[in-house]
Amino acid sequence: MGVTPSNIYLLLRTWPSLLRCADLKEVVEEVKGLGFHPSKTLFVVALQAKRGISKSLWDAKVDAFKTWGWSEDAILDAFRRNPKIMLYSIKKVNAVMSFWVGHLGWDPSVLQAVPSLFGYSLEKRLMPRASVVQYLLSRGLMKKDASLYTPFKYTDKLFLQEFVNCFEEEETSKLLSLYRGGR
């Protein structure tokens, strides 16, 4: 069916029971129909997402995204970018959306464009870095049209280097305090 040996090996290693499913052919065809190429690793993740959760849970997750204003197309687009998005709990989806859209007031389309943000820890990564980004934006130390995703994708070391330690001592001290949870 076009699935590469390396992807078959990945499935055998991570989810061997999937290969014994009676409806495997239909699920593979469905995932291919969603635009995933069987030679890509994302195909395996999409297969796990489509087969790993029930239809009712899938629909509930779709409804959770819709409550935040996402259309069916937006959800499918995010799924194509990162199929793991449907493996996160509804609680996690709502928590990230509530923080990003409700608390920060930021555009939810960033989350659609970069659904890997849902995979980061809210308390350990998103909240501390958002505090720094908000401060930088409010002080004009970061361009208003700068990527909101970039600060979150960096390693801790690179984040500190690029968004905290590059300023004067007083500013750096304030940013470190924000990053570590102080207000």
Image (cartoon, rainbow, N blue to C red):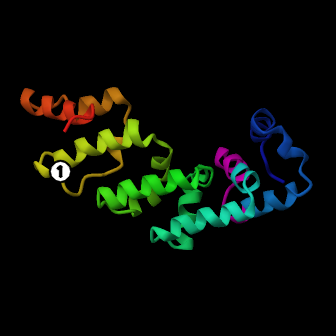
Residue 142 visible to the viewer: no
In this rendering, the answer to whether 112 lies above or below 152 is below
Residue in front for this viewpoint, 76 or 33: 76
Q: Residue 160 at what x, y percent from top left?
A: 27, 30
Q: Is residue 24 located in the magenta-colored stretch of the structure?
A: no
Name the side, left or right, on which 90 lies relative to 48. Answer: left
Name the side, left or right, on which 70 lies relative to 22. Answer: left
Residue in front for this viewpoint, 130 or 11: 130
Q: Within 10 angstroms of label 1, few (less than 14), some, or many (20 or more) residues?
A: some
Q: Residue 128 at what x, y percent from top left?
A: 31, 39
Q: From the image, which quarter does the N terminus lie in?
A: bottom right
Amino acid at circle 1: Leu
Residue in front for this viewpoint, 93 or 44: 93
Q: Residue at x 40, y 63 (%)?
A: 109
Q: Residue at x 73, y 59 (%)?
A: 31
Q: Which residues are magenta?
A: 32-47
Asked where in the image residue 155 lies, by quadrant, the reply is: top left
Name the residue tied to disc 1: 137
Q: Is residue 33 located in the magenta-colored stretch of the structure?
A: yes
Name the side, left or right, on which 5 lies relative to 89. Answer: right
Q: Residue 101 at what x, y percent from top left?
A: 35, 61
Q: Residue 142 at what x, y percent from top left?
A: 17, 47
